[in-house]
Image: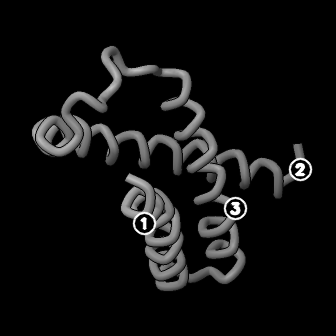
Amino acid sequence: MSPTARRSLLSYVVALVVFVIIDLVWLTAVAPDLYDAQLGSLLADPVRPLPAVAFYLLFVAGIVHFVVLPALLRDSVRWAAGSGAFFGLVTYATWDLTSLAVL
């Protein structure tokens, strides 16, 4: 495996672990009451794990491709933070604004 491929794979694994930990904190500490109150009967019961896993794998691939690897090339934590914040804004606004438009 080339050094570039190894760095990409390591970046993906680290980003996946960090993202899952952060999301688990959100899903266990904040989301249950918020989602029940705001979404109620729209929530799947039980949760469908396959779409959730697909989301995690795809979203982290986006983080690595658009944020982590370019930040490593620039050797800039500041660039990573700004780019990561913008990537998060764009991706989550996709859901929020689309929902506001159609629901």
Q: Residues within 10 Å of mark 2 (few under 14, many from 20)?
A: few
- Looking at this view, is 46 or 30 the one in front? 46
Q: Are the residues at dot 2 and dot 3 in contact (C-beta closer than 8 Å)?
A: no
- Answer with mark 3 or mark 1, whichever residue precedes in sequence: 3
Residue 45 in the image: state x and y as whole percent: 31, 17
Image quadrant where residue 55 sits:
top right
Spatial distance from mark 2 to mark 3, Cα to Cα? 17 Å
Image quadrant where residue 96 sits:
bottom left
Q: Are the residues at dot 3 and dot 1 in contact (C-beta closer than 8 Å)?
A: no
- Here the colouring is one colour
User: In the drawing, what numbered circle is on residue 76?
Assistant: none
Residue 25 in the image: state x and y as whole percent: 23, 42
Residue 82 in the image: state x and y as whole percent: 47, 82
User: Which amino acid does the dot numbered 2 rest on?
Assistant: Ser
Q: Nearer the viewer, mark 3 or mark 1?
A: 1
User: Which amino acid does the dot numbered 3 rest on?
Assistant: His
User: Which amino acid does the dot numbered 1 rest on?
Assistant: Leu
Asked if 65 appears above or below 41 in the picture, the reply is below
- Which type of secondary structure does the marked residue at label 3 adopt? helix
User: In the drawing, what numbered circle is on residue 65?
Assistant: 3
Asked if 100 appears above or below 32 in the picture, the reply is below
Residue at the disc numbered 1:
97
Residue at the disc numbered 2:
2
Q: Is residue 91 left or right of residue 31?
A: right
Residue that appears at 25% across and 38% down:
27
- Which type of secondary structure does the marked residue at label 1 adopt? helix
- Looking at this view, is 59 or 2 the one in front? 59
Residue that appears at 59% across and 42% down:
13
Residue 72 in the image: state x and y as whole percent: 65, 72
Q: Nearer the viewer, mark 2 or mark 1?
A: 1
